[in-house]
Amino acid sequence: MDTKEIIELGTEFLTPNYGRMPLALVKGQGTRVWDADGKVYLDFVSGIAVNSLGHCHPKVVAAIQEAATQMLHCSNLYYNQPQIELARFLAQKSSLNKAFFCNSGAEANEAAIKLARRYARLFVSSERYEIITAEHSFHGRTMGALAATGQTKYQQYFDPLVPGFRYVPLNDVSALAAAIGPHTAAVLLEPIQGEGGVNPMTQEYAQAARELCTKEGIALIFDEVQTGIGRTGKWFGFEHLGVVPDIISLAKALGGGLPIGCIMASDRFAQAFTPGTHASTFGGGPFITRVALAALRAIEEEGLVDKAAVAGAYLTQGLTELAKRYPTAVGAVRGAGCLLGVPLNISGGKVAAAALERGLLVNVIGDKVLRLLPPLNVSKAEMDEALQILDAAISEALT
């Protein structure tokens, strides 16, 4: 089928809850993707921060082929070695010793919320249930994660929401301190707000949150679904902030392109999950954990965390030059590593469409922030190509 036929069938048979580009992708290799008509694109969306190794990385493909001959699924009523090896790898990188595996970022945040609430009720006070999150945050679309999300546009018409959530401005220490009270069970924050516009947390705010949570004996949770696994130029976003949270949630890049979610927790907080308190039928199965471990080892062996930091600096420099070239249209770059946001004073949709026409996939948040999420192994030549296309796309959008 060609692109037109695929889009027509999709319109007929799929629910209309995605604002899709007029594009039907059929193949990916490295940083490139192909549409159904044979046109090639440079992919700076990466499945929204999922494909950190690019498309069809040979080590991931080999792991999929091998894992498919071993075992696809077994229940968590039993131990399986790949799950334990993946947990050990993540524990060694994060300094958080216990893992719970699930299937997505939203599920991981649900698990983090449940763990924090149960810990607070068991070990701090039976009155502790409230979770404080940040305005403009995004934690997922399941009902608990949706209630945690500090953006009303995602919540409209889904009320009544799960109660027990409060929102405060990001990076406002006094507002956070004022919000914490006798009902607070945890503080849940993103090191960099991805869906909120690529808004980084400051070190001062992170350290204040750490001190406040420690004083209250409650959990500091970092949602690392988008910032984790090397995306920011470090294994985890919290490493930029000089603090260690009690719980982190992971997904996206964790599976090398396949679905998996996870929380990592300290021994102290993990003890609140006793048998029967939480579970996931498919979470941490032997197939996906073999593949995820292969993806993480590839990132480590190829030095891609450090390369992401270098790529981020190079892209930031190039995007800053674009801002100088178009001072009325382009603002200062935000983010870290291969998670960058560029504020726009023109239509982001027009820029993205013009870039698409020229062979570059980019993502726009709220029509006003251009988000760049290239694979961690993006080359200098590919970054130069993307910057040239963006230059032309911005120029077209202005005219």
Image (spheres, grey):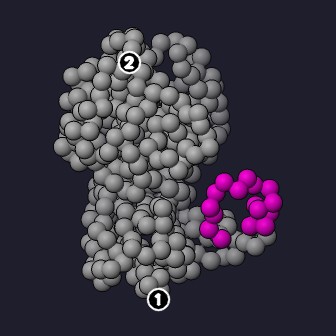
Q: Label 2: few (<14), some or many (≥20) within 10 Å?
A: many
| In the depicted structure, whether residue 79 falls above or below residue 89 | above
The three-letter amino acid code for the residue at tag 2 is Arg
**Residue identifier under label 1:** 399
Q: Crowdedness of circle 1 by 10 Å Cα count: few (<14), some, many (20+)?
A: few
The residue located at (76%, 61%) in the rendering is 10
The region drawn magenta spans: 7-22
For the point 66% across and 54% down, which residue is it?
17
Marker disc for residue 128: 2
Give the x, y percent position of residue 371: 42, 63
**Is residue 308 shown to the viewer in this render?**
no
Q: Earlier in the sequence, mark 2 or mark 1?
A: 2
- Residue 116, label in figure: none
Of the residues shown, which amino acid type is indicated by label 1? Thr
Q: Is residue 270 above or below residue 211?
A: above
Quarter location, residue 322? bottom left
Residue at the extreme bottom: 399
Residue ID at (30%, 24%): 181
Instruction: Return the x and y of residue 337 as percentages of the image width and height.
Output: 32, 58
Residue 235 or residue 391, whichever sits in front: 391
